[in-house]
Amino acid sequence: MSFQVWVLIHLVGVVGFAASHGVSMAVSFRLRSERDPAKINALLDASSRSITPLYISLLVLLAGGVGAAFSGRLWGFGWIWVSIATLVIVIGAMYGLATSYYKRVRVIAQAMEEGTEAVTPERFDEVLRSGRPLAIIVIGIAGLAFILYLMVMKPTLGLAPSATPPGPGEGGVEIAAVDLAFTTDTVAIPAGEPFAIVFDNRDAGVPHNVAIYTDETAAEALFVGETFPGPRIERYEVPALDAGSLFFRCDVHPATMVGTLEAG
């Protein structure tokens, strides 16, 4: 599958994870003001029912993220490893803090609903006003914000693939990508003979490629270069093309990275 499809799968998982986790967060806030044991048990049941879709969404976002990393050749960058480590730490911390706490709340609420007097309302109130749920929420939000920063800004964090600039050779051309745009929108190449494109992707951590099509519909591909993140330079060996005006683009960013290739 293409890089864009993997990213779409990843985003679907992110949306599902956020929606499922939102149920647990809403329950956490509601428990701080609710004192009816029956309603508390109902709230905890609602939170429990959101766990299965939460883990399914987590698997989907992980699958999409890993697939995008392989497709976009992102494993050489520091930000993706730190993102994975942050996700593991945050999930582990939230699970460890939440499991024992909400198990305790459920046991007390069920006992009180059945009429036990072993726990006083004052003690139950103290348990429900514990700072642990807030700590869980803060850890989750802070972890998510940090991961979003890493995904958007893509800092190398001291780890990035080295760029090796091969020359285009006779008849070859050079194309660069900077700030989600090609540095040239018109390229001349020889018709009827193979040639090379030296593609310089200068956008750190952002995957780009160069693909050539017969026209702007991109319905017929004549050549599709490998997608890779910057900063890196790759040499594409392109087969001979017939004379005429052709269309080239970045398949990852087709709305902004386009150009005309004149074969003659």
Image (cartoon, grey):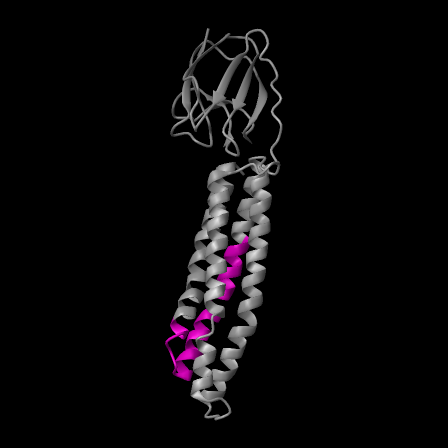
Instruction: Pick whichever, 127 or 39, lies toward us.
Output: 127
Q: Residue 83: horizontal and vertical position, in percent?
A: 55, 47
**Residue 53 within the segment the image draws in magenta:** yes
Q: Is residue 49 in sight in this rendering?
A: no
Answer whether residue 109 is magenta in the image. Answer: no
Q: Identify the residue shown where x is 52% and y is 37%.
A: 3
Up-down: is 141 above or below 26? above
Quarter in which the N terminus is drawn: top right
**3, above or below 232, in the image:** below
Front residue of this view, candidates 7 and 200: 200
Q: Give the image quarter of residue 213.
A: top left
Q: Residue at x 46, y 60 (%)?
A: 138
Specify start and end residues of the magenta stretch as a single range.
Answer: 30-59
* Viewer-closest of 96 and 2: 96
Q: Residue 186's x, y, as percent?
A: 41, 14
Dominant SS type (magenta): helix
- Residue 63: x %, y % from top left: 56, 48
What residue is rendered at 51% in x and 74% in y? Answer: 102
Residue 4 is situated, as x and y percent measured from the top left of the image, at: 48, 38
